Amino acid sequence: MKLRRLIALISVMALLAAACGGGTAASSQKEVIIGLQLEPPTLDLTASPAAGIPQVLLYNVYEGLVKLDEAGAIQPLLAESWELNDDGTEYTFSLVEAQFHNGDPFTADDVVFSINNVIGEGSEHPFKETLASIESVEAVDERTVKITLSAFSANLLFFLTQGQGVILNQNAIADIATNPDGTGPFMFDNQVPGDSITLVANTDYWGTAAPLEQVTYRYINDPNALNNAMLAGDIDILAGVSAPELLESFQDNSDFDVYTGLTNGEVTLAINGANAPLDDLRVRQAINTAIDSQAIIDGAYFGYGTQIGSHTTPLDPYYIDLTDVYPYDPDEARNLLAEAGVEDLTLRLLLPPVSYATRGGEIVASQLEDVGINVEISNVEWGVWLEDVFNGDNYDLSIVAHVEPRDIGQYGNPDYYWAYDNPEVAAMLKEADAEPDEGARNDIYGNIQREITADAANAWLFLLPSLSVTKAGISGYIANAPGLSLDITQLAFNP
Amino acid sequence: MALFTLRRLAIFVVSLWAASVIVFALLSVLPGDPAAVILGTQATPESLASLRSELGLDRPVVVQYLDWSGDLLRGDFGTSYINRLSIGRQIVDRLTVTVPLALMGIALAVLVAVPAGVLAAARHRKATDTVVSTLSQLGLAVPAFWAGLVFVTFLAVRWRIFPAGGFPGWSDDFLGSLKALVLPSVSLALVQGAILARYVRSAVLEVMNEDFIRTARAKGLTRTGALWRHGLRNAAIPVVTILGLQLAALLAGTVVIESVFVLPGLGNLLLQAISRRDLLLVQGAAFVIAAIILLVNLIVDLSYPLIDPRVRRR
């Protein structure tokens, strides 16, 4: 029969195609393919705040004066040492000897150029504000740089470990969006938009060379497809699992290692304090007590995730545990609402298109309805979320992960989208940032956390975990994500 | 014939212009300020204003349209504000995935569906007919993405015959690229083939009931002989129409399959550009998709007189 012949023909064709290809994953033990979800929209990290850019480039291709280690502590990188003067207004950095990927030497002038590129007049750097405490930067000699501050800022060194602190090659700046040039152990090789970015080892690296020769980042937007690519052996590392329900397929399998680490992503139920009756402390406290965050972790993130009680994480040096301030107590929530004289309250919950928000939002809504608050859920797209929630105040509640590290400073900004206005907290934040002594500083930050939690500024649902899977035999993978870099400089295949 | 061609070409040009207006108008009413999406949570009022003026969003809509369509006429799609890459170049790169994928899908569908449909019609109300009808019913019921997921689960994850997704690029690895398109095109062909088989079957059955077939039979031709000499060519017109629609749908609508198999195709590009509010890129890609559909329709229209001489006189 013709039909049967045709089917046979197709099967033969498929088999032929199968036979033509070889193995799919990296064959050499010096090459690794990393699967990621969000492709960077551009490679120019001076033009876009997208987290996908530093994820690939920071510490691997670009280096700053300092870097953040796995535990969130600051370590030397292009600056081998630094000194702070007595009144805390002058940093003097001693630089290492290094060169850019195109062969240009790295000098103090490059540091001056790179920092001025962020803070200079007319700069549209997305993180310009974070370096605002820098008044000027000058090259003392080829290996020494002096940064003068208008006033001491404790967070400055931290920000210099991130994308805004990287040292750029001023001669290669024109090609920054297509061919980033830095001093790091990996060089940019090529990009296939929509598919992959490849880095190769820098054989002239000034420090200890990275064990790997080539790293390819493959971008797979769909969590299921990402999972399948890992199971099929197409990729060696699955970094940043966004669908925790899929982790199960790797959990009890000796071919894979599963990593669960900490991030800076506080999943926050943002409360619009400008809207009545949410301006009433008792109503906000009622919302906090009505929420059972463990149920949200279990339901929205399959039990992965850590409870937090304020807008800080264990990766912050000043973190204190405040998870016991609002224990889950629906009766107490009802009492608080009655005390505030609130009846028939209906709140609008706007959810951006991320699974922790859409799933978590359903659970939050049912927990709030349990204590008598009606919740209208709207699932919106990012553009609408930015317009209605972040840049407008056209919402009552929203859920989003605040992934920026050390972002507690937003509670000092009454214009921020949750409209939290407590002058005392704003003053304490300024005081903490200006305090050079670490112990004293951490004490102030402790008080700030207690204060914003007592004010029930928001409800902090949980800390987003950093979930990753690697093939068994890969070492040097960093489970925690204290900053925005996915640091691959220690990654290796064990024999 | 010349008049027919000319008229079709005129319709094509006018439709193309209408498409450009519609694409532009739809995008300007899309909610969400592109500048705000690009700058995200780090935006300040100053940076928003300066980006809006850089994007040209502060100009009147009519001026924006004339500017864009003028460049388009010169074949210049502009440069993306997000990744600073040439938009025309990006679209062409993605078409090198989507066009072969759609063509492979449609070719597989034709290879299976046309013989199957003709066979079913020739053996009307016999076992073969029932088998073909049932199989095509089944193919219609299975969504392409689901078939794709099943293929991935078994052929890629379990048996590792095919990659689970991705596309190595034609110039880097030609056979690997071909292999990467096998499962997605089979998934597409399943549904399209099922639809096509049903159309072929009913088109042939309809033709077989026409008077000229009865005349042919009366002249002494067997049923199969009449089908071959007079039936097939007459049944071809509705089938070609459907084929054109299917090809257009595949070229524009492989988004889901591209996402299941992680292929850097045009649908994927469009989806990504929308989420990043890369307005110019969305405009360019949507316009190209519209142009492709119009072009396929034009080709289908122009093929009618070749298949059926009677059309030439209309």
Image (tube, rainbow, N blue to C red):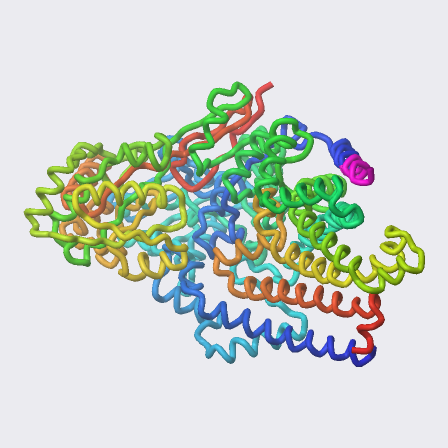
- Which residue is most to the right? B220
Image-based side of B54 in relation to B208, left or right: left
Picture quadrant where residue A348 is located: bottom left
Residues shaded magenta: A1-10
Q: Please determine whether, in this image, residue A314 is positioned above or below residue B17.
A: above
Nearest the viewer among A134 and A270 is A270
Nearest the viewer among A98 and A337 is A337
How many callouts does the rendering have? Answer: 0
Image-based side of B10 in relation to A245, left or right: right
Q: Which residue is located at x 88 percent, y 56 percent?
A: B226
Note whether residue A185 is visible. Answer: yes
Image-based side of A348 in relation to B216, left or right: left
Nearest the viewer among B249 and A73 is B249
Note whether residue A91 is visible. Answer: no
Q: Position of residue B161 (x, y in %)?
A: 69, 30
Determine if the magenta segment contains residue A2: yes
Determine if the magenta segment contains residue B256: no
Q: Position of residue A33 (x, y in %)?
A: 59, 35
Prevailing secondary structure of the magenta residues: helix
Q: Which residue is located at x 44 percent, y 40 percent?
A: A79
Image-based side of A351 in relation to A109, left or right: left
> Can you say which quadrant of the picture contains the C terminus of chain B?
bottom right
Q: Position of residue A271 (x, y in %)?
A: 23, 50
